Image (tube, rainbow, N blue to C red):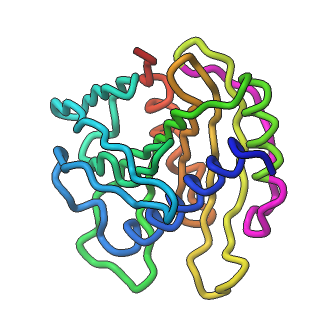
């Protein structure tokens, strides 16, 4: 595993854990203008990233993107920061009545600022990582475009390899690159609910603009 792939895998793994914990624990209830927070690796200081501008359900980030997120959803800006990657997250509103382990649908935007040598290498590493992680099941691959840039989408079921009682999810990683970041947009729902949220996810991706 080369350094870029390892860094990407660590950032995405940290994001997956944080998102699952937040989505199960009311993490979407924070205010839209959250202050930066970070997770540090033992060997590297987390990079500070500016809080984005949020106006209603429109977000503009100095990381290099703007997006319209679903009405009523909550923003967790800079939910994960490492020395070379940063993740913003968006959560659907928590229901009035929740049950233990209930997961909110969510979207995360991962900007890997230390980039692979080429977009093709980033795509190859993403495909290999997705295929080799034991919690990723029933993987399918399709081509799409985000902000006019060619992208690849990996859709799969997420089932914890260590904890069979952990909530099962349906996820899609949309990966692409530009001169600022190697990007991974992850769309996640409880198991068997992805198609219900697909119009919401499609609208988010259609509104996503690289700046």
- Residue 18 magenta-highlighted: no
The answer to whether 9 appears left or right of 82 in the picture is right
> How far from the left and from the top, in percent, is residue 110?
50, 41
Q: Is most of the magenta stretch helix, strand or loop?
A: strand
Closest to the observer, 16 or 86:
86
Q: Is residue 96 left or right of residue 198?
A: left
Q: Judge by depth and name the residue closer to the eye, 186 or 37.
A: 37
Q: Is residue 102 above or below residue 41?
A: below
Residue under the image location 55 percent in, 46 percent down:
186
Left of 147 or right of it: where is 211? left
Residue 133 painted magenta: yes
Q: Position of residue 62 (x, y in %)?
A: 31, 26
Q: Which contiguous range is marked in magenta?
A: 131-146
Task: Tell me what residue is drawn at x 55 percent, y 16 percent.
Answer: 179
Residue appearing at x 35%, y 23% in the figure: 66
Name the residue at 63% across, 44% down: 173
Q: Which residue ends up furthest to the front in the rendered image?
A: 43
Q: In the current view of this chain or complex, which residue is farthest to the top?
A: 148
Give the number of callouts.
0
Residue 52 x %, y %: 24, 34
Q: Say above or below: 209 vs 171.
A: above
Quadrant containing the C terminus is top left
Which residue is more in the foreground, 201 or 86?
Answer: 86
């Amino acid at each position: 595993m080369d350094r870029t792939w390892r860094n990407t895998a660590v950032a995405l793994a940290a994001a997956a854990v944080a998102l699952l914990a937040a989505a199960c624990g009311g993490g979407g209830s924070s205010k839209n203008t959250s202050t930066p927070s970070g997770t540090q690796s033992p060997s590297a200081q987390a990079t500070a990233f500016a809080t984005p501008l949020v106006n209603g359900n429109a977000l503009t980030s100095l990381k290099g993107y703007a997006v319209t997120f679903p009405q009523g959803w909550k923003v967790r800006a800079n939910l994960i920061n490492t020395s070379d990657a940063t993740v913003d997250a968006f959560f659907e509103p928590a229901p009035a009545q929740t049950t233990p382990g209930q997961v909110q649908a969510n979207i995360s935007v991962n900007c890997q600022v230390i980039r692979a040598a080429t977009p093709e290498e980033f795509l190859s590493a993403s495909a290999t990582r997705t295929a080799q992680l034991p919690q990723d099941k029933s993987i399918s691959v399709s081509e799409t475009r985000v902000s006019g840039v060619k992208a690849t989408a990996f859709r799969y079921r997420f089932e914890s390899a260590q904890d069979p009682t952990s909530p099962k999810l349906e996820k899609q990683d949309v990966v692409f690159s530009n001169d600022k970041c190697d990007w991974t947009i992850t769309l996640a729902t409880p198991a068997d609910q992805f198609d219900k949220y697909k119009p919401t996810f499609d609208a988010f991706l259609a509104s996503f603009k690289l700046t």
